[in-house]
Image (cartoon, rainbow, N blue to C red):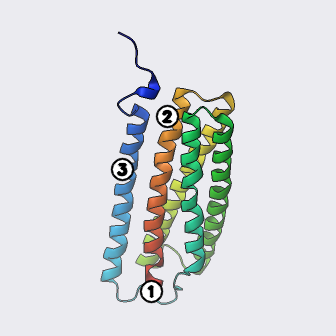
Amino acid sequence: MNAVPYTHRVAKPNGWWGMIVFVATEATLFGTLIGSYYDLRFKTPEWPPPGVPDPKVLLPLILLAVLVSTSVPVQLASSFARARRVGAARLALLLALALQCGYLALQIHLYVDDLHRFTPQGSAYGSIYFTLVGAHHAHVFVGILLEAWLLLRLLGGVTTYRGVGLQATAVYWHAVNVLAIAVTIVQLSPSL
């Protein structure tokens, strides 16, 4: 009996399934945080409380568009790796990383700026706001680390293992972007 090559494999690789399970746990975490946000919001007479400025709308929406757009080069990198086009895969990952790092740097700046205006200890709003946004930033950072690691690994060429890593990372990144949309909607909901 002849061995079936990887490219004709019927089932998804274990790394892909592992990432799906991980993403499901992360979705549960964010579902709980978003549920807590709205539970607190509907039990609190003023949301956000007095002294806390309403969230700005335009800049977070622009940043969200930039972040979501990075799903394209990440998916392209995965496709290029499957086609053994290592240079194109590296370039696509590099583009995604540049945009993602810029997004995260600006978001951290805005997060720190918000910390100067109100604190997590000051109200239920501050507590859930900083927890939700901070968790999102942590997930973006993890995605950046995964992509940077894969970019370095691609310096040694494309292997089946690295291709699966890129597929799994693309799944993670798409999930981060879906969660980013949800977090941004929740974050902006007092202004909408």
Amino acid type, residue under disc 2 in the picture:
Val
Image x and y of residue 97, in percent: 65, 51
Q: Would residue 116 be found to the left or right of residue 175 on screen? A: right
Mark whose residue sits in front, 2 or 1: 2
Q: Would residue 93 be found to the left or right of residue 18 on screen? A: right
Residue tagged 2: 164
The front one of 99 and 43 is: 99
Amino acid type, residue under disc 1 in the picture:
Pro
Residue tagged 1: 49
- Mark 2 and mark 1 lie on one chain; the one further toward the N terminus is 1
Image x and y of residue 72, in percent: 56, 53
Quarter containing the N terminus = top left
Is 185 rendered above or below residue 53? above
Image x and y of residue 98, in percent: 68, 54
The front one of 187 and 154 is: 154
Which class describes the residues within 10 Å of circle 2: few (<14), some (14-19), or many (20+)? some
Residue lying at 31% horizontally and 81% vertically, measured from the top left:
42
Residue lying at 51% horizontally and 85% vertically, measured from the top left:
54
Looking at the image, the residue that sits furthest to the top is: 1
Marks 1,3: beta carbons within 8 A: no
Q: Would residue 99 be found to the left or right of residue 168 on screen? A: right
User: Residue 25, labelled with which disc?
Assistant: 3
Q: How many marks?
A: 3
Separation of disc 2 and disc 3 at Cα? 20 Å
Residue 157, image quadrant: top right
Mark whose residue sits in front, 2 or 3: 2
